[in-house]
Image (cartoon, helix red, strand yellow):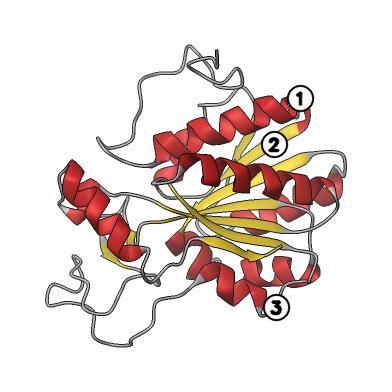
Amino acid sequence: MEPRYPKCLDPKTKPSNFCPGCGYGIILKTLGQVIDEMEVAPRTVFAVDIGCNLLAWNYYKLDTIQTHHGRVTPLCVGYKRANRESVTIGIAGDGGLYAIGLQSFLHAAHRDDPVTIIGVNNTIYAMTGGQLAPTSLLGQVTDTSPQGKFTYEKPVLGPELAKEMASSSAYLARGSILNIPQMKGMLKAAIERQLAGHFAFVEIMSYCPTNWKTDAQQSIETLEKLEETFKVGVINA
C-alpha cells in the first residue's frame, strides 16, 4: 500500500500554507512520490521561485534553494553546471516563467540544459492578489482587468513556445491536477530526460479558488474550461 506521505516530505513540516483548494499541495505530493520512487532524493536539489511556490521551501527533506522572482531557471542551470551529478528541479508560477523569467527559460530550453523545470499555471498572479498574467485569457476578469482582458488575444502557451527554441531532445509537456496519474508520469519522464542529459519542462494546470473566487465545483469547471485553450499532453518527446 502506498504511504500516505512521500518519504522525502518532512513529516514534521507545519500544516499547509497554501490557500484552501489550492492545487500546489497535489503537485508537491505527487512530485515527492516521483522522487521517492526514482530513488534520487540524496542527490536532488529543489529550487523555488518567488510566488506561491516559495511556500514549499521547507516541505521536502531535500537541499532547497529559494531565488528571486523569475530566476529559478538560471539558478537551476548554474547549480547543475557546478554539480553535474545532481538532479536539479525548479518550480515557478506562470508569471515567474513567462514574464520576468521568460528569457532565461527559453534560452535554457535552446541550450538543452539538463534541468527539470515545473511551471504551475493558474492564469493569474496569485500570491500578489490575482492580477492579469501572461497566461490570462481574453475577457478574463482579474484585479487589474476588472472589465476583462482586452489588450491582446492569445495567452502565452509555455510548452508550445519553448518548442520553437528547444532542442529536439528536450521533453516538453502539459499536465493537470485533474489527471494526477498522467501528471505523475510526466514528472517522472521529465526527471528521466534530465538524467539523460537534456532539458525538461512540465507545465501543470492548477486551481486558484481564492483569486478565481470559486467554490470546489466551480474550480473544477473553470480548470476544465481552461484546458480547452491549454491542451494537456506531451508537446515534445
- Give x and y (percent) for residue 52: 39, 45
Query: How far apart are labels 3 and 1 at the CA level?
Result: 32 Å
Viewer can see residue 100: no
Q: Residue at x 64, y 67 (%)?
A: 104
Q: Secondary structure at mark 2?
A: strand
In the displayed structure, 175 sits above or below 25; it is: below
In the picture, the disc for residue 42 is 1
Q: Secondary structure at mark 1?
A: helix
Q: Is residue 217 left or right of residue 126?
A: left
- Give x and y (percent) for residue 30: 52, 34
Q: Label 1 near label 2: C-beta < 8 Å? A: no
Q: Residue at x 31, y 54 (%)?
A: 126
Viewer can see residue 193: yes
For disc 3, the marked residue is 165
User: On the rendered image, what quadrant is the C terminus found in?
Assistant: bottom right
In the picture, the disc for residue 45 is 2
Q: Amino acid at mark 3?
A: Met
Q: Residue at x 78, y 71 (%)?
A: 167
Give the mark nearest the N terminus, 3 or 1: 1
Nearer the observer, 123 or 102: 123
Q: Residues within 10 Å of mark 3 (few under 14, many from 20)?
A: some
Nearer the observer, 5 or 94: 5
Query: How far apart are labels 2 and 3 at the CA level?
Result: 26 Å
Name which quarter of the figure residue 138 lies in: bottom left
Q: Amino acid at mark 2?
A: Val
